[in-house]
Image: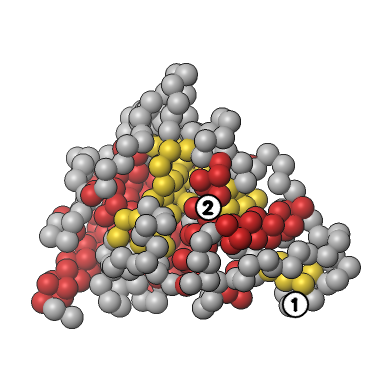
């Protein structure tokens, strides 16, 4: 590692070490507008004064008839696993972008590998630098907030709103701008429980900021949020994520959802509340119908016997699990599930098949 990287690492470490102190003393700190670059990261003040008007409007009002376009942003590594998911996701984004009631604008894959790949011409891509070696402690998700900080600072984003999405999302219908009145629109996760972890969260969300229930049960995705709000939240999200990972008690409490808690805390610290929109997405196999939902999130494996009975926790006679394709993309024309399997799973496989059949050089 060169001297520049060592200096950069030291600056981030210094910033992380100070975060708890800043949380406790910075209730009256001035609002920071600048986003961090490699030379300014140690100057980030992660906590700002709580806005007096929680419903302050960013980027427009829900009462206007003018379209409120949002830019879809997906963070990704350069792994085979993330890449094939992004290709499928972008295929369906393009299919629904011009559909009725759509407020979908541009699209960016934020590639946090630090280098371009061969899919730059297929998918609009911004190349972000990863965290310095070892800083993520094997938890690669920590690169997500740092990638967003870089993108928001450097990219020319035309839309006033951002949809933060993920590679394993498939859009199933045109998405309107679900945010309004200065509030974000976010999917509530049952396993994000701020009240349960109040003691831990008070390290990052001090009592003078209000009850811990102000922290919404969300992650950063899917979330539609005003661009100016996200520019304020992103540096805090990065710092809180790093500080949480560095603290053994917090790391043990939150595990693989640590970065989700960090975003929820950061949003609350900046006074940005969220509409909890349960119909934002569905998660097969537990959600069985598409209904009025907009996104399929295929994070769970789908295992069934040939009679269509779910065998979750046991590899089924028929299965679709994204983890089966961590080193190679799924083949074209995956077999459809047996009769009796819910609509959500059937739709998921059909949509993957349609995308792979129509994407050029699939499997390359």
Tell me if 319 is positioned left or right of 92 in this view.
Answer: right
Is 322 situated above or below 221? below
Residue extending farthest to the left is 3
Q: Residue 253 appears at what percent x and percent y?
A: 49, 68
Tell me if 85 is positioned left or right of 36 in this view.
Answer: right
Q: Residue 121 appears at what percent x and percent y?
A: 37, 57
Which one is nearer the viewer's eye here, 282 or 48?
282
Query: Residue 311 sits in which quadrant?
Result: bottom right
Q: Which element type, helix, strand or loop, lies under badge 1? A: loop
What's the mark number on residue 314? 1
Few, some or many residues within 10 Å of mark 2 (<14, 14–19, 20+) = many
Q: CA distance from mark 2 to mark 1?
A: 31 Å
Q: Which element type, helix, strand or loop, lies under badge 2? A: helix
Q: Which residue is mark 2?
A: 91
Tell me if 153 is positioned left or right of 268 in this view.
Answer: left
Is 337 situated above or below 211? below
The tally of labels here is 2
Few, some or many residues within 10 Å of mark 1 (<14, 14–19, 20+) = few
Could you tell me if residue 334 is visible in this image? yes
In front: label 2 or label 1: 2
């Amino acid at each position: 590692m060169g001297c520049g990287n060592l200096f950069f690492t030291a600056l981030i470490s210094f910033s992380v070490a100070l975060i708890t102190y800043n949380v406790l003393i910075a209730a009256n700190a001035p609002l920071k507008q600048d986003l961090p670059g490699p030379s300014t990261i140690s100057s980030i003040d992660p906590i700002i004064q709580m806005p007096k008007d929680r419903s302050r409007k960013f980027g427009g009002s829900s009462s206007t008839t003018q379209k409120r376009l949002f830019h879809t942003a997906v963070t990704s590594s350069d792994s085979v696993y993330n890449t094939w998911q992004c290709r499928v996701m972008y295929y369906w984004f393009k299919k629904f972008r011009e559909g009725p009631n759509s407020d979908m604008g541009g699209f960016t894959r934020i590639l946090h590998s630090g280098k371009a790949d061969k899919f730059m011409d297929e998918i609009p891509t911004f190349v972000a630098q990863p965290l310095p070696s070892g800083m993520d402690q094997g938890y690669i998700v920590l690169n997500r907030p740092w990638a967003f900080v870089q993108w928001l600072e450097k990219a020319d984003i035309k839309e006033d709103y951002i949809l933060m999405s993920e590679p394993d999302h498939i859009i199933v219908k045109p998405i309107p701008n679900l945010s309004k009145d200065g509030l974000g629109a976010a999917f509530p996760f049952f396993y994000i429980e701020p009240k349960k972890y109040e003691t831990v969260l008070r390290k990052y969300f001090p009592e003078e900021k209000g009850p811990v229930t102000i922290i919404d049960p969300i992650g950063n995705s899917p979330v539609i949020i005003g661009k100016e709000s996200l520019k304020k939240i992103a540096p805090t999200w990065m710092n809180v994520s790093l500080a949480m990972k560095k603290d053994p008690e917090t790391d043990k409490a939150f595990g693989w959802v640590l970065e989700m808690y960090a975003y929820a805390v950061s949003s609350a610290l900046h006074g940005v509340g969220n509409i909890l929109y349960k119909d934002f997405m569905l998660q097969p196999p537990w959600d069985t119908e598409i209904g009025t939902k907009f996104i399929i999130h295929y994070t769970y494996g789908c295992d069934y016997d040939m009679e269509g009975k779910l065998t979750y926790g046991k590899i089924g006679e028929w299965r679709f699990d994204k983890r089966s394709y961590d080193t190679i993309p799924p083949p074209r024309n995956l077999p459809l599930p047996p009769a009796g399997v819910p609509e959500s799973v059937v739709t998921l496989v059909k949509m993957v098949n349609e995308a792979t059949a129509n994407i050029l050089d699939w499997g390359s």
